[in-house]
Amino acid sequence: MTEDRLQWLVDRTEISETITRYFNALDLRDWQAMRATLDETLDLDFSELFGDPRAVLDSDAFIEFAQPLMGGFRATQHLSPNHVITIDGDSAEATAYMYAWHAVEAPSGVENTYTLRGSYDISMRRTRNGWRMSRLRMHVWDEAGNKDVFRLSRERYDALHAAPS
């Protein structure tokens, strides 16, 4: 096996592992581990889910956004299989399938889950600390359940983290 081919295999494994670690950290609410998968800035496009326009954020600001949004869920499961990766030197592009299930405490009679299926386009950059995500664009193919779970999660997070009176 040539050295270039071996390096490609190592890079591909590290890129795929970084993507998996991102979603595992999200489900575990391990914000430090999640931050370790991100470049200094992150080009985000979740407009197919939230309708918000694309944004380029400092990755620390993205974590500050994600904590209250995701931190109130009772449970989530983000699966990211089928990684197709193209590597060009110190840059890479990946497509990863997405299955994202969200469950929150909800009032009686209110649907408490929401599921997304789709894919992500992910740009990666090799840094001195390994491969890091620099762009994350979500494509939603199908959704089921109550999209309002994100609001309910945020409300639960706020209640759990409110300063005592």
Image: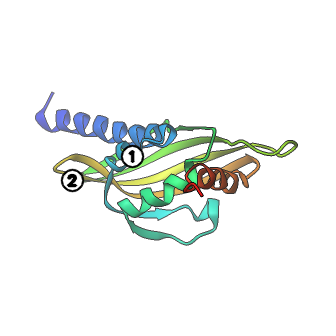
Q: Name the image quarter holding residue 98.
A: top right
Vertical position of residue 120 compared to residue 62: above or below: above
- Left or right placement of residue 4 versus residue 28 in this view: left
Residue at image coords 23%, 34%:
10
Image coordinates of residue 65 in percent, x first then y, are 49, 60
Mark 2 near mark 1, Cβ–Cβ under 8 Å?
A: no
Q: Point out which mark residue 34 bears.
A: 1
Earlier-in-chain disc, 2 versus 1: 1
Closer to the eye: label 2 or 1: 1
- Left or right placement of residue 125 versus residue 140 in this view: left
Q: Point out which mark residue 90 bears.
A: 2
Marks 2 and 1, how far apart in space?
21 Å
As helix, strand or loop, the secondary structure at mark 2 comes to loop
Residue at image coords 16%, 50%:
128
Image coordinates of residue 28 in percent, x first then y, are 48, 37
Image coordinates of residue 69 in percent, x first then y, are 57, 55
Type of amino acid under label 2: Asp
Type of amino acid under label 1: Met
Q: Residue furthest right?
A: 109
As helix, strand or loop, the secondary structure at mark 1 comes to helix
